[in-house]
Image (cartoon, rainbow, N blue to C red):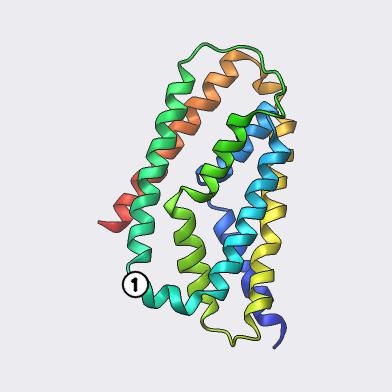
Amino acid sequence: MVTAPLLQGITLGFAICSTLGPQSLFVLRQGIKREGALRVATICTLSDLLLIATAVVAADAIVMLFPEAMSLGVWGGAVFTLAFGCFSLLAAFQPKTRLIEDAYSARVTKTAFAMCFLNPQVYFEMMALVGGTALQFAPTERTLFAVGVGLISPLWFFGLAAGGSKLSYFFSQPRSQFALDLITGLAMFGLAATMIYGRL
């Protein structure tokens, strides 16, 4: 059926996005803090679409050239996640002030690009999962599959940004900011531990 690649792409895209990793949590936190949340969501969405298209187009070459991509992606992603957890825990114990919207912060933009392109876990998900799954379809069907995966990204990232903004009033107090950073850091440590345990 023509719709099969599209539906499978949508299912895979939802499965990838629904795992709250560093990238997703960063978008949510920017929504809560109202610091360039829409800009961050746009960067993450466009980056995802670029990586999805690349993975589907280059699926055959990726599998042949990088047979260890899955293992490297998981280990690299665990290290990246641990680092993000450390930064979040450090932020928790820094002096807090009431939140002020900073939609033009270069720091936020740079961090968004780092979350999109410096996390090896992203390449594992896109190249190994998306690219690997695309191999089961004929070349003419891979476009529909890529569209299906790509449909989820804008819904997910802009949904996180909007959802975070709804919580911004609650997290406007220093004590709430401390809790947010602390919980984020501990969650990242837990996620990294799960990734490492899965590879042992």
Q: Is residue 200 above or below residue 83?
A: below
Q: Is residue 20 above or below residue 58?
A: above
Q: Can you say which quadrant of the picture contains the C terminus?
A: bottom left
Q: Position of residue 158 (x, y in %)?
A: 72, 46
Q: Position of residue 166 (x, y in %)?
A: 74, 32
Q: Position of residue 51 (x, y in %)?
A: 57, 61
Q: Can you say which quadrant of the picture contains the N terminus?
A: bottom right
Query: Which residue is tagged 1?
Result: 67
Q: Secondary structure at mark 1?
A: loop
Q: Is residue 143 above or below residue 200?
A: below
In the rendered view, does 107 fall on the left or right side of 188? right
Q: Amino acid at mark 1?
A: Pro
Q: Nearer the viewer, residue 43 or 16?
A: 43
> Which residue is located at x 61 percent, y 57 percent?
48
Residue 88 in view of the camera: yes
Q: Position of residue 84 (x, y in %)?
A: 44, 36
